[in-house]
Image (tube, coloured by chain):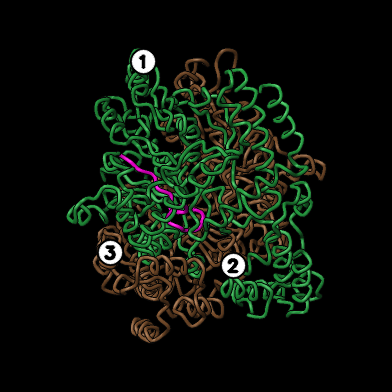
Chain colours: A brown, B green
Amino acid sequence: MTSQVTSVAASLKQARPEAYFLPDNSKKSASATLESLYQIFTVPEAPNSTLGRIEQDISRNLVGFLQEHIVAVEKDLSELEKDFSESSIPNKPMFVSEQAEFLLQKVVAQSVHTSSPSFVGHMTSALPHFMLPLSKIMMALNQNLVKIETSKAFTPLERQVLGMLHRLVYEGNEGFYDAYMHDRHNSLGAFCSGGTIANITALWVARNKLLRPEGEFKGVSHEGMYRALKHYGYDGIAVLVSERGHYSLGKSTDILGIGRADLVSIPTDSENRIDVAKLEEKCRELEKQNIKLMAIIGIAGTTETGTVDSLDLLADVAERENCHFHVDAAWGGPTLFSRKYKDILKGIDRADSVTIDAHKQLYVPMGAGVVVFKDPTTLTNIEHHAEYIIRRGSKDLGSHTIEGSRPGMAMLVHSGLKVIGRQGYELLVDQGLEKARKFAEMIRNDEDFELISKPELNILTYRYVPKTIQALLADASPEQSRAINEVLNRVTKRIQKAQRARGKAFVSRTQLTPVKYDRQATVVFRVVLANPLTTMEILQAVLDEQKELTTTVEAQDIIEELNMLVIQYS
Amino acid sequence: MTSQVTSVAASLKQARPEAYFLPDNSKKSASATLESLYQIFTVPEAPNSTLGRIEQDISRNLVGFLQEHIVAVEKDLSELEKDFSESSIPNKPMFVSEQAEFLLQKVVAQSVHTSSPSFVGHMTSALPHFMLPLSKIMMALNQNLVKIETSKAFTPLERQVLGMLHRLVYEGNEGFYDAYMHDRHNSLGAFCSGGTIANITALWVARNKLLRPEGEFKGVSHEGMYRALKHYGYDGIAVLVSERGHYSLGKSTDILGIGRADLVSIPTDSENRIDVAKLEEKCRELEKQNIKLMAIIGIAGTTETGTVDSLDLLADVAERENCHFHVDAAWGGPTLFSRKYKDILKGIDRADSVTIDAHKQLYVPMGAGVVVFKDPTTLTNIEHHAEYIIRRGSKDLGSHTIEGSRPGMAMLVHSGLKVIGRQGYELLVDQGLEKARKFAEMIRNDEDFELISKPELNILTYRYVPKTIQALLADASPEQSRAINEVLNRVTKRIQKAQRARGKAFVSRTQLTPVKYDRQATVVFRVVLANPLTTMEILQAVLDEQKELTTTVEAQDIIEELNMLVIQYS
């Protein structure tokens, strides 16, 4: 494959030199150099130029392009770093063709084939083809959504996208959206670069709402956390979420000055759902400690196991405690499109705010998250203005976002919602969930694998436990069980890395604490079934390769350790 | 122009229906529907499809495409909103061609021509052509830079970009970059979606560094602002910046729990630079109030006037006060490429952190900001990990960023730095600064305009003040001056809006408090000269049109008010 890349590169050298920009070794005058600089802004790539060809290749046959150009076998990172070791910005301009070749050989070739149907380890998946030309329109227009003066129609468009996703979650009536979707004083949500910023936005709003102005006190926004807590007489404010909560929540409480210690982790039950009894216990405890409950967070699709908390029960608790209820549905939000499975998210419409990542299951390119707020006035808690933009009373989107300048990604979400439609997304969701159930069955039926978390949505975890070890584990003492699991953890790690290095398939790995194993740290394979092109045959091949890897030199030493345990404990 | 759009749209209707996705009115079975769903992931747009054609149009002749499709004359926002009023996500999938047509007529047509040479009002400008095909490669690869497993070569590439920009600012030696650029335990900076996130990152780091763990106290990151301030015995922590500081800094102190009140605004001198004497005075004052100085921020290119603070003097103060010194060079950073003008930023290498926006003067599409840190260990103050990614000791970029999942924008910055090179950026900077100086001269030479802030970089502000009024202002009493300026403010606003509505040219407006007018609020036109294609002829036309607009019905009533003042005060 590498030689193919080289030959493509060689043939490109003969192409038109694309001298849009004038390298320094020419003898032209300064004004001519300036002239050639203007050219890079005015003269497009010729179709037969290196970049022109790559573009056409991508347009005509993206799958082929990626297959041909991405080198599957893993290269050592330290090897890759050699191609990116120069720390000086080059003095002389470089031909576009030269850089395009470099990108093809050193970057594209060594990137990750995230859209491959056998890449089932992470939440980054395939894109519908129409997203690519649309992205190009977005880039060509280069709008800045912070304000209308640099985005015009993109402003109502983004508001519509926020409205549509708000309606997906809250199912308000026509009149509600007529009143609020384009209302200059309110906002149904905030468009973000991703779920992390969306979650921070939700908690920022919740914090400022809780510690709002009162009498002489001008609110936490103005006076900061220290004076706010002094004013209200609290010793802290807490956010409660299950131990499966996304790591962005820790970042959020750190950034917001709440403190990671006051993001309180609630244990989960055997199904990886937040234990509501323990949550209520914690609420009482916090009250005694004079720590004010700021928010309860429900997860609609945990990152590691795809589990959905019992949102209705959480809504009850949040109501009783009179605190903000946020649902992190970055992953699972689009399940609402499925008439068959939407009840898994029952209660989500009782949340004060909901995060949904469009670059996950809305199949939009990286960089699009959204947070919607039930009450359109909520975002005024973080409203801000400036003299030259986002003036008071304007409809500039920037007055309700953490970010300032932002691209027009909303256009891509808008197009996804229209071109794929509710029915299309429903199909995507349904087939993913059903594939996950079938894959779980496949794992259960295989004597050498153990399903660790069954799929509620389209994510599941499992590990390799050969039949003999499974028998052993069934009768093992706690101590023996710990010893066996410790070795199994290393087996799982080794297989995952070896499979990734081979480059045919990719599953990720994480560490769980299953109730079944007395909450002992258990390393598992994690599979995310979002790519509609992933077939059951591909999944069978993933298992087969994992099994095969246990017989190769890569895992031999640990497999022998396992065998020793069998002899020892039998 | 509208009719042209319509006719393009009409002709497109005859094109192949692009039935990648199956609309509901077909009679096919569920499995056939699923089949057609797969098609949108596997079958690319045909070259003669609507989207295929748009793409080709953009590739062949971007300038023409934008000129032809963007309707120049401003339409009322309430009019535009009608096209985005539906809040339900459509049930049935829509043909890609139908959506493409909609985008062409309703979104592209009503977007803002940010790359037009006469669009000189904001910091969003033209892009070099090669950025478009490169963006497409980036979108097609859909990497996620939060971790190596979804970005591979993009990880060292991004680290190289951070290294290059670090070196541009700090000019470390080869050995320094060899040691740190790819070091798993350290980071030279963080790649962000924009300058706002970059500034928040810098202040987050500074806050956590100041309120770090000590004895039993586990640090602000863990314990939050309230316990941190109690532990250290401060009544607050302050950030000092000139009154010209970007509004993102207010957001930052709000979000970080510091409070907007403790972002202390220091007055500027007649040149819009921070008054260093007043800054030092404020430092003493804060000490007396037991408010700990956390950071001083210098601005290298204020958003409104393009002014650069005296960074060397600020560095002296920060050193004496032993606080974090951040420079917001979101706009002005690339001035460092200019051998002729880089001294304007003298002292920037003494900053602990520096923000640079790549989507501004590095000419990369929207969505790319960077913050670099002098000391590569600084970012460990905000380091975070998770079980399934960004594990301890990994080189995953996500452990040092506010954002989680992020696109591969670094590839575009990398390409800009290589294809344009130091010399290319130098030319871009130099011609912008020199054009601004010439335009200032043009304004000075015109009897009916008044230059309000002269360009230090490539931004200037001015207003329309007819000759007679200028004479009047020269001898006016303070009271008269206030009255005249009040009317002039309305004139400026009116002209700016009218010019924007006409759609031939665009300048922005802001409100300054010039020393010359006793700090009275003064509305001004603001011009940003970043587009290399903007000529002096275009700038002359901007002035001519503004003058002409004062004679039209749009401004008549206010101009009459002005004339009344002449009669009254003469």
- On residue A544, the disc is none
| Residue B419 is a magenta residue | no
Q: CA distance from mark 1 to mark 3?
A: 50 Å
Q: Nearer the viewer, mark 1 or mark 3?
A: 1
Our reading of the magenta stretch's main secondary structure is: loop
Are the two marked residues, 1 and 3, in contact with CB atoms closer than 8 angstroms? no
| In the depicted structure, whether residue A60 falls above or below residue A142 | below
* Chain ID of residue with mark 1: B
* Chain ID of residue with mark 3: A
Residue occupying the point 65% across, 43% down: B496
Q: Is residue A93 visible?
A: yes
Q: Secondary structure at mark 2?
A: helix
Q: Residue at label 2?
A: B63
Label 3 crowd (10 A; few <14 / some 14-19 / many >=20): some
Q: Secondary structure at mark 1?
A: helix
Q: Residue at label 1?
A: B285
- On residue A81, the disc is 3
Q: Residue B171, position in %: x, y?
A: 24, 50
Q: Amino acid at mark 3?
A: Glu
In this view, the residue in front, B363 or A524, is B363
Q: Residue A317, position in %: x, y?
A: 62, 31
Q: Residue A429, position in %: x, y?
A: 64, 61
Have a look at marks 1 and 3 and say if they share a chain.
no
Magenta stretch, residue numbers: B352-367
